[in-house]
Amino acid sequence: EFQLLESGGGLVQPGGSLRLSCVASGFTFSTYAMAWVRQAPGKGLEWVSAIGGRTTGTRYAESVKGRFTISRDNSKNTLYLQMDSLRVEDTGIYYCAKGGLGFAYDPWGQGTLVTVSS
Amino acid sequence: DIHMTQSPSTLSASVGDRVTITCRASQSINSWLAWYQQKPGKAPKVLIYKVSSPESGVPSRFSGSGSGTEFTLTISSLQPDDFATYYCQQYDSYPFTFGPGTTVDIK
């Protein structure tokens, strides 16, 4: 069974940093593109960032470009999202998901809550 | 960027009703269109991928159709478990974009 488990969320002040992790199991992690999607409280889904499988090419939403960095460690089956210069508007649940060009997002992790507040 | 719209934003329906949600893309997305269901406090779950292919285990009452820039999700006979929010997403080109969502609630 494919499974994704996020961690690393929490409360941080504006301007601060957090690193999210997503551990994958049940599939050959290194062969799949992965992504982060977020959801502000009471709002819809917003695509944040994606990374290729073996090629590790990266993509970012304009709203996070230059502040967030996506990476992966295929030896640990783990996806990361380093979030710097956090803003209040970055608050929300962050989900990791397996998928990419030509592949819908499936599965999704359970999400980890990031709260940016003073 | 490809902009996705959905209509309606909210839909009130009864058990047994046929429900249709429309999704439009601002440009062609070459059939790379998925539908997701999200229930309160839960992660989204894919229902349909590549416009009309059902994900394994998805009830047959869910179907997708469309082409070019206009797509629909149909629930043939609404069940109590189907009251949720539905999102379309294009995964043809980055940045991948989601529609704003359609909430199906009880009439």
Image (cartoon, rainbow, N blue to C red):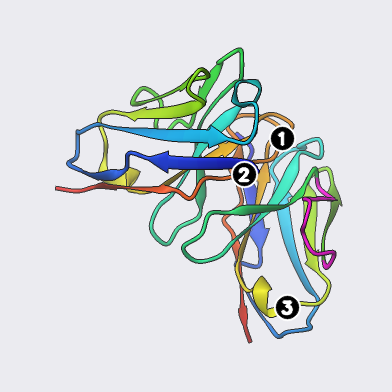
- For disc 3, the chain is B
Mark 1 and mark 2 in contact? Answer it, CB < 8 Å.
no
Is A31 located above or below residue B4 in the figure?
Answer: above
User: Outermost residue toward the top?
Assistant: A55
CA separation, marks 1 and 2?
11 Å
For disc 3, the neighbor class at 10 Å (few under 14, some 14 to 19, many from 20) is: few
**Would you name the residue on which mark 2 appears?**
A107
In this rendering, would A43 be left or right of A67? right
Depth-wise, is mark 1 or mark 2 nearer the camera? 2
At mark 1, the secondary structure is: loop
**Horizontal relation, residue A55 to residue B55: left or right:** left
- Amino acid type indicated by mark 3: Gln
Three-letter residue code for mark 2 = Pro
Q: Name the element at disc 3.
A: loop
Asked if the stretch drawn in magenta spans residue B55, the answer is yes
Give the residues drawn in magenta, as a range.
Answer: B51-61
Instruction: Tell me if residue A106 comes above or below residue B17 in the rendering.
Output: above
**Chain letter, disc 1 residue:** A
In the picture of the structure, the residue carrying the numbered disc 3 is B79
Return the mark for residue A103: 1
* Distance in Å between CA atoms under marks 3 and 2: 23 Å
Mark 1: amino acid:
Phe
When asked about the image quadrant of residue A94, the answer is top left
